[in-house]
Image: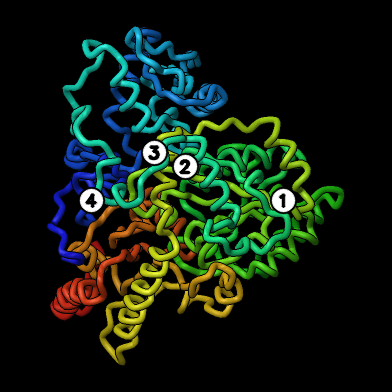
Amino acid sequence: MIGGIQPTPLGDAIPPNVPHTIVCSLPTWQDIVGFVEGEERVTTSLKAGYPRQKIHDYVKALWKICSQIHGVEGEECALSFSRKSVEECVLYVKKHAEKPGEPRACRFEIPYKSGVDVSEFPEVFAVFFPSSALTEASQFMMYTGSGIPARFAELCLECIPEELIDTSTFVIPLKTVNWRDQEYYKVHRPIESGSEAKSALRRLFAGDLGDGSANIRGVPGVSSDDVYLYASGMNAVWHLHLMILDTRPKGLKSAAFNVLYSHSHNLIEGWGAGHYVIGSGSIADLEARLASEQAKNPEQPPLAALYIDFPTNPMLQSPDVVRLRELADQYHFPLIIDETVGNLINVQLLPYADIVVCSFTKIISGLANVMGGGLLLNPTSPYYPAFKAHMEETYQDTYFGEDAICLEANTRDIKQRIAIVDKNAEAVADYLYARSQKPQGSFIKQVLYPKYQTRDIYERYLNKESGTRPGYGGLLSISFTSLAIAKVFYDVLPCYKGITFGTIFTLAVPFTEMSFHSKLQWAEENGVEHALIRISIGMEDWESLKDGFDVALAATEDAAKLNEDPVEQ
């Protein structure tokens, strides 16, 4: 196994014995299918999972207590730190559920033990809805990332009388392992104050690496005061989109340039007038759309906003940001850039964006044990006054302090960690690319990686001010000549397999199957192939990585020889 890890059974936490890990093991392609289809074999095996998709046992226990206090028979509930979020969930359920019933929101009066100091704990709000609307309420919480984190639920349960807590389904008992006891935190000791941790995170995302060097963002006047923290990347995107809807002319659609993460599409489509998808990533197609919309009504902009990833996930293509900036100025719409894949150490994108957004859960954290996200306003943007006024009026800091403390500690080695991941990913990509160029018989159709996808564009935006050699990032994808071959490669690849990226350990997932299982034709029509595996490269040594990929390549080559024209399954 890559990195000397032991094979991880279906549903086990990745890595094992890590409190609050956000990854569960999905070791075969069929396990991925079972996960997205809600197959009982898979769902009952999950001991961990991405918090927006798999609710932690501690959070479920709080839901149950809340239902006992505030609920009535036939109702389900979910919890959030934000009153606005639960009120929005009520509206979402009423709009989308076939049988919405009478959803309602209220403050959760948590039954803390007497004499326990909970003065630093945030308020918690509940949304109640009938069981018939569970799917729609769950969609809302998943798309918007509005739920409470497991760290809060854990601390909260420790302050509640034990007789109120149903622990029968707990995979990890309460009061067993403290995340601060891990070896990493003995070296990088967490600071004690949540507010101090948040200040440090804001400075980092604003471009201050804390090493005495100049700001790396490339924009004069950039400030940590223009950074806004959220519970996750999707929670940041949701609030950003609400700001767009509030500050831009009513009735305008947004647009996505290239395919975004599936939940981003769901979110942008679900609030406001909807959005266009320029799945081809063609500037000409975008220009045609802009001209067409402008012609319909020359008195208003053709778009509310344009959303892009840089580079794209999972195709690792780099949009021509300079040209997109020119179009944004010409047609008067804001350009929103998600830099999660590229990251601020490798690429410098703020000079071209009106807003930069990022999921800190990925490479910023690296340890896969905490969620977080943020957005940064460009102070030189023509939309800055309106955006800033909106944020000053509406922003509520609901990022849980203990999560901020963990995330800040995780960032201490960010430059060194990203440098190692970049170097490893380039070595793996080069190795696989060479295999794909075999004169005949290669089952690798394409290696998708910024070095081989629109390389000249990507390199224009390398961050030469970060004090390190900027790289191509730690993410790559492989497309295969057939779905059957892709399944063989995934099943035999000896690494962790699960849903996230940017981790210090190598992690693979059949991205299209996982993200677009119910929309495979749409994904293919927009250039995202079904027979594709996304791989996030970690910090393992090169020989271990090479040996692991050799195992998968050899097994897949044997399978390809047995069936020169594999039947897609």
Q: Position of residue 232 (x, y in %)?
A: 47, 42
For residue 232, which numbered disc appears in the image?
A: 2
Task: Mark 2 or mark 1: name the one nearer the start of the chain.
Answer: 2
The spot of residue 140 in percent (x, y) is 47, 32
The label number, if any, that marks residue 14 in the structure image? none
Tag 4 or tag 2, which sits nearer the N-term? 4
Give SS at disc 1: loop
Question: How would you rate the neighbour count of disc 2 (Cα within 10 Å): few for under 14, some for 14-19, many for 20 or more?
Answer: many
Viewport quadrant of the C terminus: bottom left
- Label 2 sits on a secondary structure element that is loop
Query: Distance between the Cα atoms at labels 3 and 2?
Result: 9 Å
Disc 4 is placed on an element classified as loop
The residue that mark 1 highlights is: 303
Which residue does the numbered mark 3 point to in the structure image?
Answer: 52
Label number found at residue 15: 4
Q: Is residue 203 above or below residue 428?
A: above
**What is the C-alpha distance between the residues marked 3 and 1?**
29 Å
